[in-house]
Image: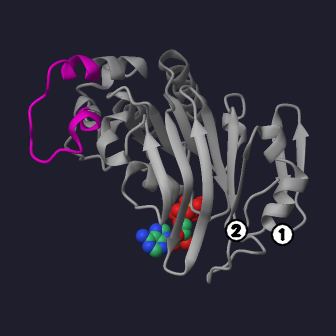
Amino acid sequence: MNALELRGAGLSYGSRTLWSGLDLTVEPGEFIAVLGANGSGKTSLLRAILGLQPLTHGSVLVAGQPPRKASRAIGYVPQHRRLDPITPLRGKDVVRLGLDGHRWGPGWLRGDDRQRISAALEEVDATSFAEAPVGELSGGEQQRVRIAQAVASDPAVLLCDEPLLTLDLASQRTITSLIDRRRRARQTAVLFVTHEINPVLPYVDRVLYLAGGQFRVGPVDEVLTSATLSTLYGAEIEVVRSGDRILVAGLPEQPEHAHDHCIEPEGPLG
Ligand SMILES: Nc1ncnc2c1ncn2[C@@H]1O[C@H](COP(=O)(O)OP(=O)(O)OP(=O)(O)O)[C@@H](O)[C@H]1O
């Protein structure tokens, strides 16, 4: 079964279309980097997959189910934001929210939930944070606990919304390799929203690039090229591969053909 399937998906806010005609099938264990201009709708795409934002057109299925029915099939890792030092939660309480955070009330742990919480913490080498007040952990440690939360229900899809932001290089490496390890070990598909491809470059199978109401999906070498990005942005953009890094020069703040009042988007390129 596909981990994720978007068919003819489109999202508009009022007269503004973020993207439309989006067909994307993600296999179990695939790592997709979602890149694009500010405001191109990357976070909105994740919200649609989470079932928090209804699509204007088309459909989304997670592990064969509509998002609302698939809550345990979706893990979500948000941007790192420093938790208040007095946050009254221990590491294991944060992980538990990945199992019952979508249900109201205090609730009781079900069946093997306790085991799932320990296994998730162990997976991110965070067993020692189980009893620790999360607010006192470092940024990278807090982000590891958030990954444990996201994988606790053994999701089919892991949605990561710029999880490396504000982390130092060493923590970025730890987080990306933990996510990669999980998807290989459990065939968890990953949608990884990022402004910076290089930290995830070794892991990426395909890129979904959104800009100016258009998109392009494909392997890194097909999408991150001067020709493709220049077309997407309607401006001269240069992409240079230097060793194991990709450098992009000339990115405008906004794509040339970004539109607040929708002209029909051109959809997939090429
Ligand atoms: N609920 C909403 N109603 C109306 N407009 C919205 C709503 N949510 C987001 N938007 C707008 O849609 C656009 C896309 O937002 P989104 O956060 O999805 O973009 P993004 O690609 O993740 O941006 P960034 O890279 O800056 O984080 C933005 O212009 C935003 O203001």
Report the residue at 54% width, 81% height from top.
Answer: 15
Residue 207 x/y as whole percent = 69, 43
Q: Label 2: few (<14), some or many (≥20) within 10 Å? A: many
Snapshot quadrant of residue 93:
top left
Residue range highlighted in magenta: 96-117
Residue 109 x/y as whole percent = 13, 28
Question: Is 205 in front, or is 179?
Answer: 205
Amino acid type shown at disc 1 = Gly
Report the residue at 24% width, 47% height from top.
Answer: 86
Report the residue at 25% width, 29% height from top.
Answer: 92
Question: CA separation, marks 2 and 1?
Answer: 9 Å
Q: Would you say residue 125 sits in the magenta stretch? A: no
SS at mark 2 in the image:
loop
Q: Name the residue under label 2.
A: 212
**Image color mode:** one colour
Are the residues tagged 2 and 1 within 8 Å (C-beta)?
yes
Report the residue at 36% width, 57% height from top.
Answer: 52
Q: Would you say residue 101 sits in the magenta stretch? A: yes
> Mark on residue 234?
1
Snapshot quadrant of residue 138:
top left
User: Can residue 26 be seen in this snapshot?
Assistant: yes
Amino acid type shown at disc 2 = Gly
> Mark on residue 209?
none
